[in-house]
Image (cartoon, rainbow, N blue to C red):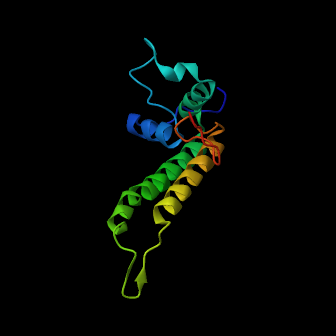
Amino acid sequence: MSGTVATPFTDAQKADIRRFCGYPAYGAGDAGFNSWRFFQAYGTLEYRLNNLAPAEAAVVLQYISTLATIEAVIPATSDNLDTESAAAWTHNADELKDRLSLFDGWRRRFCGFLGVPPGPALGQPGIQLVV
């Protein structure tokens, strides 16, 4: 045995890992036309998800917990979109941008830990495609 053990990730955890890394949905499996099979990096991600050492799997679980916490507070920023300031309180006009930047930064760190490039949904920082 090579020292790796199949990871105990649930299907829901694997879906979150893929999503946090910016990769498209896995789909129903290996049959038919599934876009994941056409991305070498996605294949690497799937291999890693199924073959991490227990200590590495524990780190992945910590990452998805942290990312879920950061992601959960992003929608709440809409509560303050209509208020610039109130009494001594002043709204951070860049709150949404700052939270998204923090979230995407953690997502990129997560991809780095897994050894895969950020997926298509995560894009590249500073690069904007105009069609």
- The quarter of the picture where the C terminus appears is top right
x%, y% of residue 68?
Answer: 43, 52
Q: Is residue 20 above or below residue 2?
A: below
Residue at left offset 66%, top offset 38%: 115
The residue at the point 49 percent across, 56 percent down is 66
Q: Position of residue 38 (x, y in %)?
A: 56, 19
Q: Is residue 85 visible?
A: yes
The answer to which image quadrant residue 74 occupies is bottom left
Outermost residue to the top: 32
Residue 12: image quadrant is top left
Question: Viewer-proximal residue, 74 or 52?
Answer: 74
Q: Position of residue 126 (x, y in %)?
A: 65, 48
Q: Residue at point 55% right, 51% down? A: 104
Q: Is residue 9 visible?
A: no
Quarter residue 79 falls in: bottom left
Quadrant housing the N terminus: top right
The spot of residue 32 in percent (x, y) is: 43, 11
Q: Give the left or right position of residue 113, taking residue 92 as reference.
A: right
User: In the image, what residue occupies the spot 50% across and 21% down?
Assistant: 35
**Front-most of residues 102 and 46:** 102
Q: Is residue 77 above or below residue 114?
A: below
**Extreme residue toward the bottom, this view:** 88
